[in-house]
Amino acid sequence: MTEILGVNAQALLPDNKKTDRPLFMVFAILAFLATLTLLASAAGYRASADWRSDLAESITVQVKPRAELNRGPNGEPSDPAIARNILLQLSAVKSVTILPPERSQELLEPWLGDTPLPDDLPLPTLLDVRLHAGQILDSQQADAALLAANIRADIDDHRQWDREIKRTTRAAQTISLTALVLIITASITAAIFATRAAITGQRRLIDVLHQVGAPPSYTARLFSTSFAMVGLKAGGVGAVAALLLSTLIGLLFSSSGGFSYFQPGLHMAFFDLYLVVAVPVILAIIIAIASWRTILKTLFEEIYP
Amino acid sequence: MHTPSSTSIPSAQTQPSAAGNNANIRANIRFERVGFRYTRDVEILSDVSFSLPRGSMTFVTGPSGAGKTTLLKLIYLHMQPSRGLITVFGQDTSQIDRKAIPTLKRRMGIVLQDFDLVDHLNVFENVALPLRVAGRKQATYRDDVLGLLKWVGLGARAHVLPQMLSGGEKQRAAIARAVIAKPEILIADEPTGNVDQDIARRLIRLFKEMNRLGTTVVIATHNTDLISEDANVLALTNGQVSRINTGMRVKV
Ligand SMILES: Nc1ncnc2c1ncn2[C@@H]1O[C@H](COP(=O)(O)OP(=O)(O)OP(=O)(O)O)[C@@H](O)[C@H]1O
Ligand SMILES: [Mg+2]
């Protein structure tokens, strides 16, 4: 016998395996969809976070050549060195490396091929700027500082990219959130429907419980725990099914060398397993509350006036 | 016929707590100029006044439609009177907090005219319901319930569903459920309607036994054969008290 919150629901309500089956299906499907949505949005979030941190850690700055170059004591152009010092002063910057001219030539190769370039062809100098972890370079501030020193530079800070990723992530999150809200609404609706049907079907039991002095909360608990149990079991089935499906999709994509966002790496496996537990529990709680409120409303309107 | 070996009901170990020494002094149920109407036009009960002392046993009689069931419903707090005053357990029923009603109901046992057994629960489970609702564990009441079922002649039927019972057996199961928790007030609506005279007398004896232990018993019945000469009677005709003898003077 299963005693839940002091109520032996199993033995007071009829054994409803057959009549509960459609309800079980509905809750399992809703849990499946909710888990899939959460898995997908978590995977998307992780992917975008990975991209963003990769991009953000290093920034390339191109210092443009000029007609009259500032020259150092050995006659080398001093703009990159000045730019380096200016950049190093910014709080987000960890280190700045002036890349050798060959790297600038590599930049032009796609257009010019590997024909040797004349020595006096003015080429931009590339600076590889490394940032402190988690910090973002304020490119406007950097631009202004460089301009003040009369240096023209292009800061390729991936800001545009970043913005794209952010926007896409946000759109995906909005879609997930909408889906979740709809799934929760559907769960509540299904629970209310099932509870109303149970109230009609078990009217005599409810009347008798009232007659023998059961408080409304007793009767409400009886029904809501029984529906919550259906939700918990169905939710477990749905969530596990969703995890299996997403793992399968992940394996398919990764073995074909494509996306790896769905592939459960070790770090995400924990979150996914946590979801498989959390989704059924949350579903059961939502069902319990919806069913509890529905039955109390009916009890107070019709039976305990 | 099963006859109890002792004169006491097996499950009744203690007297209902409220039935004290001054049982005959204080009224347990009291109506003062009570009127009741289901719809606006007809008054089903009008100017009904009486007092039932604690520990008394009273038969409510009257022709069909006289208002017996209605009167019982008012006593067991199923509804409120349209006018007048009703006190039960010394409390004005119109003043009782909604939250307190279940607690008061647990101090009453009720047998309804249509039995109200729960179809999917077997006889044992039906009879044990008041105890479960009161929070008791099966291990603590199993023997009491089985003993009582034996006493009402349902010892062999404990584990069948109500649909397998005859009308009289259902009635006995309903009565067993009403008395199992040793209520302070026992209300029975036509409890002997479906049984032969023999069983009817047995059931009346069960009620008398409950009453002897201190329970205030109110029984509505057509079956005037069961009512002894010296019994307390409240006769209703057309919603009014036509004869009264409740062992207590009515003062209004
Ligand atoms: N829910 C209701 N709504 C409207 N009228 C009702 C309702 N219940 C009972 N009545 C009417 O109230 C009157 C008294 O009914 P009640 O059930 O109290 O009679 P009774 O004395 O118990 O009769 P019986 O011996 O047949 O059980 C009847 O005329 C009946 O039609
Ligand atoms: Mg009646």
Image (cartoon, coloured by chain):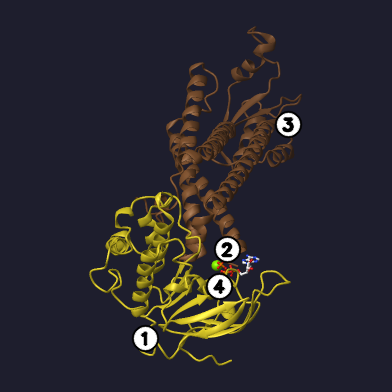
Chain colours: A brown, B yellow
Nearer to us of marks 1 and 4 is 4
Given contact means CB atoms under 8 Å apart, are the residues at marks 4 and 2 in contact? no
Mark 2 vs mark 3, CA separation in Å: 82 Å
Q: Which residue is mark 3?
A: A152
Task: Please give the residue where the numbered disc 4 appears in the rendered image.
Answer: B68
Residue A131 visible, this angle: no
Q: Are marks 2 and 3 in contact (CB under 8 Å)?
A: no
- How crowded is the residue under tag 2: few (<14 C-alpha within 10 Å), some, or many (20+)? some
Q: Quick check: marks 3 and 1 in contact, CB under 8 Å?
A: no
Query: Which chain letter goes with mark 2?
Result: A
- Cα–Cα gap, marks 1 and 4: 28 Å
Tags 4 and 3 on a common chain: no
Local secondary structure at mark 2: helix
- Horizontally, residue B148 falls left or right of residue B74, namely left
The residue pinned by badge 2 equals A303
- B32 or A227, which lies in front? B32
Q: Can you say which quadrant of the picture contains the N terminus of chain B?
A: bottom left
| Residue A105 in the image: above or below residue A65 | above
Please tell me whether mark 2 or mark 3 is closer to you in this view.
2
Could you classify mark 4 by the number of other residues whose Cα lies within 10 Å: few (under 14), some (14-19), or many (20 or more)?
A: many
Evaluate whether label 1 is on the same chain as label 4: yes
**Residue in the foreground of this view, choosing between A203 and B177:** B177
Specify whether tag 1 is near ligand 2 (CB below 8 Å).
no
Q: Which mark is residue B20?
A: 1
Q: Earlier in the sequence, mark 2 or mark 3?
A: 3
| Residue B44 x/y as whole percent | 65, 74
